[in-house]
């Protein structure tokens, strides 16, 4: 049975109880919060394995909660699944840019939510079990899988989980062209119900954080992306 602890954050009591009921049936432990402030307090003082986070909250909203968590070194790798009102595409894009792992629009299927949670935990376990290349080095860029740290010219770079997985995927297969669908399968799991635009958001964020190194991630028009092979990358000034 599952033993992971999941923080559920929503100001609607019926949604909280619905999610709690279904997760408890699957063996997950749950903690409930109704405000962003309460969620942050729990996250900082409890061992949380995943957060289900509504974006529309009183006080600090879900986007700000995501921002704060991703800027906290002790919490930045905790997976976040956003709950959004149907059609709020701008909030979805912003949430993904801030580092949310996934999103679901209300109303949602509890079965689908559980499937998403299982996928996140399954991929995390797979990464822990298959770290054959613990450290990857590429022209001043170092990816340390054990510590989940990326440095550029010895300077640490704070990446979201999706950005970390995408960078690793592209560098390990330099020169290979990956379609957006293949990238979704690689960093989110097969048959993952997410728009390909969300991958573009991850790429934009990663390029920005890599600075001039970001130019090595090349857009292949009409297909997807690749990490340029055998090309000198200018170092940061």
Image (spheres, rainbow, N blue to C red):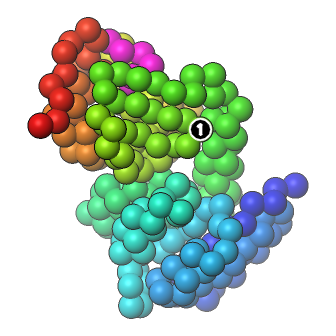
Q: Is residue 87 above or below residue 40?
A: above
Q: Position of residue 5 (x, y in %)?
A: 72, 66
Residue at (36% x, 15% y) in the render: 174
Report the magenta residues as a range: 170-175
Q: Position of residue 97 (x, y in %)?
A: 31, 55
Q: Position of residue 108 (x, y in %)?
A: 55, 65
Mark 1 lies on residue: 146
Q: In the rendered image, which quarter is residue 212 located in?
A: top left
Q: Residue furthest top?
A: 230
Q: In the rendered image, which quarter is residue 67 located in?
A: bottom left
Q: Is residue 57 visible?
A: yes
Residue at (45% x, 66% y) in the render: 72
Q: Residue furthest left?
A: 237
Label 1 element class: loop
Seen from the viewer's position, the closer of residues 96 and 26 is 96
Seen from the viewer's position, the closer of residues 168 and 59 is 168
**In the rendered structure, does residue 220 fall within the stretch colored magenta?**
no
Q: In the rendered image, which quarter is residue 33 located in?
A: bottom right
Q: Quadrant of the C terminus?
A: top left
């Amino acid at each position: 049975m599952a033993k992971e602890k999941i923080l559920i954050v929503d100001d609607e009591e019926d949604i909280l109880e619905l999610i709690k009921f279904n997760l408890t049936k699957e063996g997950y432990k749950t903690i409930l919060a109704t405000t962003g402030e309460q969620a942050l307090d729990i996250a900082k003082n409890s061992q949380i394995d995943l957060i289900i986070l509504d974006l529309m909250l009183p006080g600090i909203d879900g986007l700000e909660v995501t921002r704060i968590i991703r800027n906290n070194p002790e919490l930045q790798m905790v997976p976040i699944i956003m709950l959004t009102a149907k059609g709020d595409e701008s909030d979805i894009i912003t949430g993904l840019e801030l580092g949310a792992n996934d999103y679901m629009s209300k109303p949602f299927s509890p079965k689908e939510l559980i499937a998403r949670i299982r996928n996140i935990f399954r991929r995390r376990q797979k990464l822990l079990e298959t770290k054959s290349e613990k450290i990857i080095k590429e022209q001043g860029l170092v990816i340390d899988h054990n510590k989940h740290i990326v440095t550029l010219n010895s300077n640490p770079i704070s990446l979201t989980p999706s950005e970390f997985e995408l960078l690793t995927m592209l560098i390990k297969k330099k020169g290979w062209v990956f379609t957006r669908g293949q990238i979704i399968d690689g960093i989110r799991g097969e048959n993952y119900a997410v728009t390909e635009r969300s991958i573009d958001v991850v790429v934009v964020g990663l390029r920005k954080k890599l600075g001039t190194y970001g130019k090595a991630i090349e857009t292949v028009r009409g297909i997807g992306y690749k990490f340029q092979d055998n090309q000198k990358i200018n170092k940061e000034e």
